[in-house]
Amino acid sequence: MSLLNRIKKLPQNFVWGGATAAYQVEGATKEDGKGKTMWDDYLEQQGRFSPDPASDFYHRYPEDINLSHQYGLNAIRVSIAWTRIFPQGFGEPNRQGVTYYHQLFKYCLDHGIEPYVSLHHFDSPKTLFDQGDWLNRQNIKYFVDYAKFCFQEFPEVKNWFTINELISLAYSQYIQGNFPPNHHFDVTSAIQAQHQELLAHAQVVNLYHQMKLPGRIGLIHVIQPIYPISDTPENIHAAKLQDAFINRFLLDGTFLGYYSDETMALINEILKANNAKLTIEPGDLDILKTAASQNDYFGLNYYQSQFIQAYNGESSSKFNGTGTKGTSSFKFKGVGELVKKPGVPTTDWDWNIYPEGLYDTLKRLQKNYPNCKTIYITENGLGYKDQFVSPDKVIDDTPRIDFIDQHLAALLKARKEGVNVQGYFVWSLQDQFSWANGYNKRYGLFYVDFKTQKRYPKLSAYWFQELAKTMN
Ligand code: BGP
């Protein structure tokens, strides 16, 4: 019986991958000279779940790469843990960490799996985190040094991303407070961190091109389109404000190389309402401007859209990190309040399932950001409480298949209309550790029994395999 639903055929030479991130899969957080990230002590103190051994990818990557190959994938997203290379974020490189990544990349390439490599995926070195993380401009310098080292050391990598999801980091650290250092609605830090992460990205892009390296470089943004819950002028304006704060500021900075007047008017309105400020130093915009046309490609992560209504009270938020439906809320002073839209399904973690948002985002990029020339979906997937029944029964994750199928349909529709999308990475390759949710929020094509570390292909893995065959 064919598993194929809406999507019957993938484009030829499509990049078809699974995504991972170092801290979420590797485990081995104390091995081979690795330094601490901002997460190690924090998670230990929190006591909810441990990042060790996660999916034990540090030791089991050959198994996961073999599975990728066997199930028809041709690419993988991985990240380099900055603290495996520079345990403190700077100084002398740690050879054991360097060797590990050489071995990993070689194994991928020997097995027909192209590595797409991020330099930073939420895992700032603890030493630098303690000194202010992205809010400290010295961090940018260390990041550029680290990037330069990696470019020289790993010529086998041809596809680089600087930073993964700049907004998620800034927002989770300083607005929602579910990532360390857990600030709530610290608007000044959130906007400043966005700006400085962008600067770090831009400097690395400029460096990469100065070094005349034979690969590609870009960055990854998660975009959450914001829709007014109804078309009143107040709700439309609330949507514009929230969009400016979480999407547009970063898209402008990345692909225009400046923040447009309209974007800044919206940002300034938010800053004013929250008694916050953004500092742009002389020279910053020149750096952004130089980089804006030099992004070779763009990684788009898309999970959900948001619906909003105007709101003028005080800020407050509740984060659903347990998968108990209906427990989240978000109200942002002077911006808006997130609300549910009748008829739009949600996950157990209250994420709206809305594939139209992916289509709209792709069309928006095409229309407003001509510098965004080539796009890869670098994450998309469904967090789900997969149930393991028995080793002889395939884990039935039909809702995940349906989710991906709908989003692929949106992608292919936009592609048909001229948006240059060249690939799709499912989040995630195998089940892994989720930053603020732990281990019951599973995303993988491959189920991981975290006690034994045994892998089991889910129904979605077979579906992926069938789709892969349609590329020929
Ligand atoms: C993205 C991150 C990933 C991953 C994913 C799912 O924001 O880049 O690292 O975690 O979202 O999110 P979560 O684990 O919170 O469900």
Image (cartoon, rainbow, N blue to C red):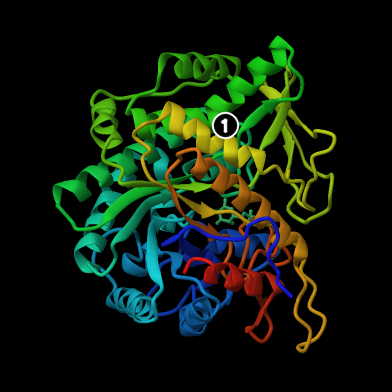
Q: Disc 1 designates what residue? A: 186
For image coordinates 69% across by 75% down, the residue present is: 458
- In terms of image quadrants, where is residue 440? bottom right
- In terms of image quadrants, where is residue 459? bottom right
Q: For this view, does 445 lie left or right of residue 157?
A: right
What percent of the width, then of the height, locates residue 143? 31, 51
What percent of the width, then of the height, locates residue 273? 60, 15
Which of 49 and 411 lies nearest the eye of the viewer? 411
Which of 217 and 2 lies nearest the eye of the viewer? 2
Q: For this view, does 185 lie left or right of residue 34?
A: right
What percent of the width, then of the height, locates residue 230? 76, 20
Splitting the image into four quadrants, where does ligand 1 fall? bottom right
Q: For this view, does 164 lie left or right of residue 5?
A: left
Image: 357 above or below 322: above
Asked whether the viewer can see residue 433, the reply is yes
Seen from this angle, which residue lies furthest top?
Answer: 233
